[in-house]
Amino acid sequence: METTEHLCTLVANAGFSSQKQARYRLFCERFLPQLSDELRTTLTTDAATAQSFVSATLNSEFLQGQLEKFPHWYNELVDTPLSRQTYEQAWAQRGHSFSCLQDFNKALRQFRNQSMCGIIWRDFNRHADTLTTTQELTWLAEICVQAAVNFHYPLLREKHGAPCNRDHEEQLLLVLGMGKLGAGELNLSSDIDLIFAYPETGDTHGRKPVSNQEFFIFLGKALIQSLDTVTADGFVFRVDMRLRPFGESGALVSHFDALENYYQTQGREWERYAMIKARVIASSLPGEARTQLAITELYQLLSSFTYRKYVDFSVVEALRKLKQMISQEVARRKLGDDVKLGAGGIREIEFIAQAFQLIRGGRDIQLQDNRLLTVLPLLEDLRCLPEGMATQLTNAYCFLRDTEHAIQGFQDKQTQKLPSDPDQQRGIAQLMGYQDWPAFYDALNAHRNTVKAEFAAVIATPENKQSNAPVDGLWADVWHNALSEDSLLKALTDVGYEDPKRTLSAIAELRECHPVAALQPVGRERLDNFMPRLLETLGESPAPSATLERVLQLVRAVVRRSAYLLLLIENPDALRQLITLTQASPWIAEELARRPALLDELLDPRNLYHLPQKSELIDELRRTTLRIPTDDLEAQMDAIRYFRSAHALRVAACEVTGALPLMKVSDYLTWIAETLLDFVVAASWREMTERYGYPDGDERATPNFIVVGYGKLGGIELGHGSDLDLVFIHNASTTGETDGEKRGAKTLDNQTFYMRLGQKIIHLLTTRMASGALYEVDMRLRPSGNSGMLVTTLTAFTKYQQNDAWTWEHQALVRARPVAGDSELAAAFMRVREELLCSARDREKLLADVVNMRDKMRSHLGSDKDGDYTRDFHLKQDRGGIVDIEFMVQYAVLGWGHQNPGLTTYTDNIRILECLAQTGILSTQEVDDLTGAYKAFRSMGHKLTLQQKSSVIAVSELDEDIRIARDKVAKLWQKLMSTPPAGHRNND
């Protein structure tokens, strides 16, 4: 009696009504006498224990009812969250063999109810956080489902025989958990959405043979009955099978081929949303190797349906329709205060994440994760969400889920509707940490408003995403040729199209081409929606007619993959970026037409015009490839090719808009190459060592191997489309071999191992896929050129350079540096390089060799083969061009390096020129002239590449600055390379 009075006093002091107090008193009077004196005394004297007891039991009539039936369960309530193993042990203690189905069903229900009591106890007392509660509920459901399969499968197998395919291999049932169960986020009184599948058709071979389909239907029905049927002990979990193919009218169980056929031919957009969270939670043959193989096959099947390899904005329109249907249902059922379905509720947070997962998950495979709170920060990293939004949505989600649990834990009912009863409202508010309902409700609405605003931003229509009005109907008339030619020409002229006739001709050609004529209705609708928007937006550009022709390259490339058109319809700012960039560079237009997936890069200007550091590039590539299995070579090659193309587009965008100076452009392009080479070397090393073991048995994470970059890569001066001049060097024993035999693999001698490693690297770089090659590679600068070993030792490289290398090979060494591989070997190479470049040379012979090589190059590659220096200018090869500057720099390094070792420190021409000024080998004025010319020529070369123009320019068309720079370089060549620079005399 004393304990009852004490607990009821706590309830009264908390402000609950007299009716609530009376009902709680009845519970105490029925339950407390069944406890030991010691437990009752603790409830009376220990304030924390009493408060925990009241918080849980007062706010959960379900908990009250279970404790009245099984008072000893109170002794087993613990405050510490449980592990999956603890739940499995608790179920195992109830026995593995049951005399009948009734005993099994009874035990399963009691196991579930007792577990629920513990979960509610911990959740209501905040001894477990939101995700811990949802994880425990998920484990509980998985164990119950697996227990039901384990009980029924042997009984059916004994009766009908094992289900087998035509090769007599036993088939298994896989149980897919969908929704919150699949994501590991189950709530307190959730139903469980399941799909049943098995690999192959066939028959059983028992005393009552049936088809595999019939067998697994029997198993599925038995499983549902054991879980879903309400008995005197309640139920285990309500089971919902409506997510299966064809819903309630479809077969209860499907084999893999039937699933694949359905999803590839009839699957709907909302089913793609559902499949994001799909996860196998149970099987009829758990733990067997064949089970994991079947699971992998099923996931691959579902993934190909769920995720598209391109950026897919079609899901946004599907989401709008789905949300509209839910809103209508919410209004019909008056569920405005439903924390799941109402505006700003749980479902909207899920939709935000799932929309971006479907839009980008095919390419950004790190988004192929079914855990909501794991995906939200990734979306912010990818700039799909504004900065800080992931945290706000996470906080809102946890608040809403805790509220949902407080609602559902009251009577173990599947509802998310806020109660109207004042006592229940007060209880929820106090469980959530608020003094009263108004304070809680204000906090709830703040979270819902955040969610509602972000959700509206995600599914906003194109018209709502821009300030201007919807597209003028005139542009639809232009696209459909609905007016007279004179009227169309006048309309185009009035808005600034510089060549209206050419524009109408280009539009007509597109409109009448076969791919457009053969479009399906959805594709046609999207094209008819897109073209007027394009024509109107082009009117804002300086040269609409010329730019239209460039954009139409892209339109023709994607017209049958209209999701790309939808991307531009849904994102007007991306369309403007497209027009800006294609107007500035036909190279960009061609790249986008060749690789339409790059349109995704136009969605966020913060990404497009952001210059990352090399560390950011490395981290981005790591995250991009993290989720790709190491044995899926094709997926890895696709991913790194997209990475390179995406960043190359960003560089070009920065350059044509003036957001990035020349030197930074080259830095960026060089970092991209280095990042990719690091990845390719690591991937090749991993594959080779798995197949053949480690050279000399030296197990190491990085190979005893380096990639040396020459030319533009070595000089940190890569341009758009530059190939890579590479040399491979290793430092393993020339007589050793790998330890493959010790590892159960094949053994190779070290030289063969490293040769194959080099071949593997070249293969990953140069193989042409649908997305093209990663880089073109030139290996001719290795010792002995094409006739030499693909990979050489550092000792052999040094010996060749000292004894057999030509002068031009030493010139090339000036711009050589390690760009990937082992850091110790890289440092050793740089010491060798310095030693070689600092060797004393006969300057007269050196000068003759350099000039002779330059004359050969100019005669073979220059534009002035007939000696006419005044007609054309080859930016790189002609007199006064880039190569003249490079040769002067290389000659100076080789000629004076032994006296000035600092000349060998850098590999880029600009910093070497600075060193030449500091040492007095060249005057400050000479260095300034060469530096200015070099930068001007390279900048012009980049512009010509982006404009897809030749490097040979008519002299009459040269800018005055370029003409002056050319003449200065030519005069300096004549001065410096006909006789040694005067400055050297001071250093002799």
Image (tube, helix red, strand yellow):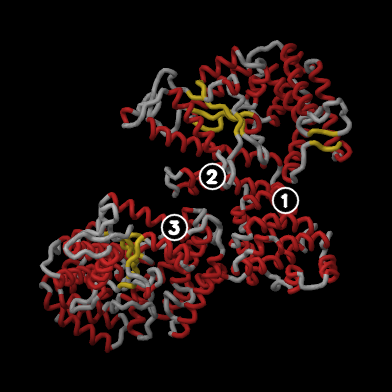
Q: Earlier in the sequence, mark 2 or mark 3?
A: 3
| Foreground residue among 645 and 966 | 645
Residue drawn at x 10%, y 72% as measured from the top left: 36
Residue 462, position as x, y percentages in the image: 63, 69
In this view, the mark in front (3 or 1): 3
Using a 10 Å C-alpha cutoff, classify the residue at mark 1 as few (fewer than 14 neighbours), some (14 to 19) or many (20 or more).
Answer: few
Q: Are marks 2 and 3 in contact (CB under 8 Å)?
A: no
Determine which quarter of the picture holds residue 945.
Answer: top right
- Quadrant of the rendering where the C terminus is positioned: top right
Mark linked to residue 303: 3
Residue drawn at x 60%, y 66% as measured from the top left: 520
Mark linked to residue 657: 1
Q: Label 2: which residue? A: 640
Residue 141, position as x, y percentages in the image: 28, 66
Residue drawn at x 80%, y 57% as measured from the top left: 543
Which residue type carries mark 1?
Thr
* Secondary structure of residue under mark 1: loop
Which residue type carries mark 2?
Ile
Give the residue at the far bottom of this rendering. Answer: 19
Determine which quarter of the picture holds residue 460.
Answer: bottom right
Q: What whole-number distance in Å separates the C-alpha atoms at marks 2 and 1? A: 26 Å
Which residue type carries mark 3?
Ser
Residue 196, position as x, y percentages in the image: 32, 65
Using a 10 Å C-alpha cutoff, classify the residue at mark 3 as few (fewer than 14 neighbours), some (14 to 19) or many (20 or more).
Answer: some
